[in-house]
Amino acid sequence: MRFALGLIATVCACAQSSIVLQPAVITKCSPDGMGSAVAVWKASTSPVSVRVGETALANASPAEGSVGTGDTVTDGMVFVLSDSSGSELARATAIVKCGSAVEVLPVALSQAPFFPLQVGNEWIYEQWKPTSGTTFITRRIQRAELIGEKVWFVMQESVIGSDAVTETRYRSDELGRIYLLGSNGEILWLDPSPNPNSNARLYTRYREGTLDVPAGTFTNLLMLSDRSVSYYDEGFLARGIGMIYDWGTSLSGVFIYGGVHLVQARIDGNLIYAAPSVSLELTAEASAFDVSNRKAPDCQPAICYVNCGYQPCFRATVRSSQTADANSSVDLDLLDASNASLYHAKLSGTSVAHNVQLYDNATLPFAPGNYKLLAQTPDGRQSVIPIQIK
């Protein structure tokens, strides 16, 4: 079981001293409901002491310091910072709430949430966009906050290599529904129940199935669509893991982002990733593309200052799992019947989604016929799939 621990800090007007508990809200507690925190103080005098009732956590201590509590914190427990005469300088009061997070254990995976909320849970994704190529995204439940009587988990998202960080707040209820806190209050974000609320922002397309992503093979899935955006945004959640795959296309079929794949995750302290193996995997979104009737995806830019013409393409994904070296390269070629390369790209990374052109430099679609898509690495590994152009 998981618990949430919040606090209220009060500072005496008689002295500019303070004591706080860190983190501000704790959701990991012992089975008997005891929370663990660190008391941090700053006093205008020294020595000082920190006491809980008659028990001293720190005695004759410097004006600034900290002390761990161990699994001893209960609801309403008061931490008092005092000077050498015993006069109170400041205090902090702990608040404990149960059931704010659900522990994900292998033995209980069938009942685990589709979006596990717990401080410390972390997901690393590989994202590909036509405009910026491949980037890696980290999403982490950084802390929990007590807002009113509800515990909200704060997810921080950042692109690896960038200092920019965004925060989103989520909470769950006793039915496993997930709420998102926006500027106008909370909204129902996800209802994974068998009869979901039709007002949920994420619409359940179907359940079950199996999906392979760089982090591994996952079953017990929800396929979801986002109702709130003006483009097609769809993805998969795996029970006990969270989001494992997401992609977005414009209403005309142009990729906005070609795929967000889960690379690894840490859920309740358990690291989830696919063990490396010597392999090269090549996949395409389909095996046949009708360019004659313009039914293949059109990859022309969303804004064209000249007549761009019809620029058919398809998305291919290459996964090289021999090494974790993000700088490893893969050559990708579209070959005609004579094995001549009509399109070539050099891809970097262990898992890359890429748009393969089905047109020449004059933006004329390739002629109907049988082609091959070939991926090969410098160490000689190859993967080939047939492609038909109609």
Image: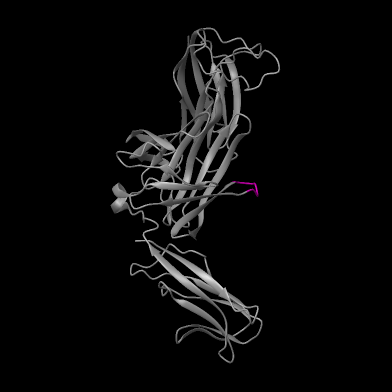
Image location of residue 47, percent across then percent down? 61, 87
Give me the residue at 53% from left, 46% from top.
Answer: 184
Going by the image, does 49 lie left or right of 27?
A: right
Image location of residue 139, percent across then percent down? 52, 48
Against 150, is 233 above or below?
A: above
Write the start and end of the magenta stretch as one range. Answer: 159-164
Q: Residue furthest right?
A: 305
Q: Quadrant of residue 59?
A: bottom right
Give me the residue at 47% from left, 77% from top.
Answer: 78
Image location of residue 330, percent across then percent down? 56, 31
Q: Nearer the viewer, residue 71 or 231?
A: 231
Give me the residue at 63% from left, 22% from top.
Answer: 301
Against 278, is 370 above or below?
A: above
Q: Is residue 186 visible?
A: yes
Against 25, is 261 above or below?
A: above
Q: Quadrant of the N terminus?
A: bottom left
Predominant SS along the magenta part: loop
Residue 250 within the magenta-colored segment of the rendering: no
Going by the image, does 337 lie left or right of 204?
A: right
